[in-house]
Image (cartoon, rainbow, N blue to C red):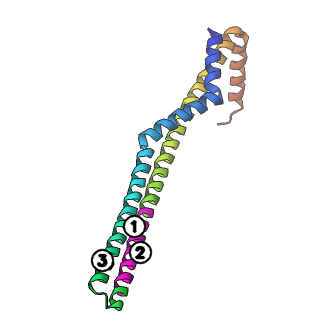
Amino acid sequence: MSELANFWNLILESNTFNFIVLLVLAVIVMQKLKVGTVVQKLRDDIVDAIENSKQVREQARKHLDDAKHKIEHIDDEILGVLTLASKQADNVAASISEGVERKLQQIKNNTKKVIDAEEKTLIASLTDKTSRSSVELAKKYVKSRLVAEPDLHKKYIEESINELDKVKL
């Protein structure tokens, strides 16, 4: 029975076991945060923004072509429409790009904050459990030593009394 307890304690104190527990907890946290869904949504938003930009640019080009057919003799007006359409497409693309970058940065910041908070909570929990296990192991060891060697009990009591005598109040 003692060998089983020692084996169990060895497992609990091993770095490999603690690492596996940490990995399992990290996977659970990642699943709860649904990081894949957030990234996929961000990707979809970017694709939609690019498609919208392409549609705006395409619409601007269609308007330009219509103007060329209607007013072929007014070269200056065609050049004005082309310039305006290009600027609008560039402005829309820049605006969409800035918005996507801001959203991406916000998501990154929020994700990092949540992961950091969960990591601190997990570390505190693991530290507490490890401390409790260590105290229990120490108790069991001291008790087993006192049972095995009854003279140690008297020795520890005498040492404690001597130490208390040294303390000045």
Label 1 packing within 10 angstroms: few (<14), some (14-19), many (20+): some
Q: Which residues are magenta?
A: 80-101
Which dot marks residue 44?
none
Which residue is pictured at 55% across the width and 31% down the height? 21
Quarter the C terminus occupies: top right
Can residue 107 be seen?
yes
Would you place residue 40 above or below residue 97 in this image? above
Residue type at tag 2: Asp
Per the model, the C-alpha gap separating discs 3 and 2 is 16 Å
Q: Residue 82 vs residue 119: left or right?
A: left
Per the model, the C-alpha gap separating discs 1 and 2 is 10 Å
Main SS, magenta residues: helix
Quarter the N terminus occupies: top right
Residue type at tag 3: His
Mark 1 — residue? 96
Can residue 138 be seen?
no
Residue 139 occupies quadrant: top right
Q: Residue 11 vs residue 105: left or right?
A: right
* Mark 3 / mark 2, whichever is N-terminal: 3
- Which SS class for mark 3? helix
Query: Picture coordinates of residue 168 (x, y %)?
Result: 68, 36
Mark 3 — residue? 63
Mark 2 — residue? 90
- Mark nearer the viewer, 1 or 2: 2
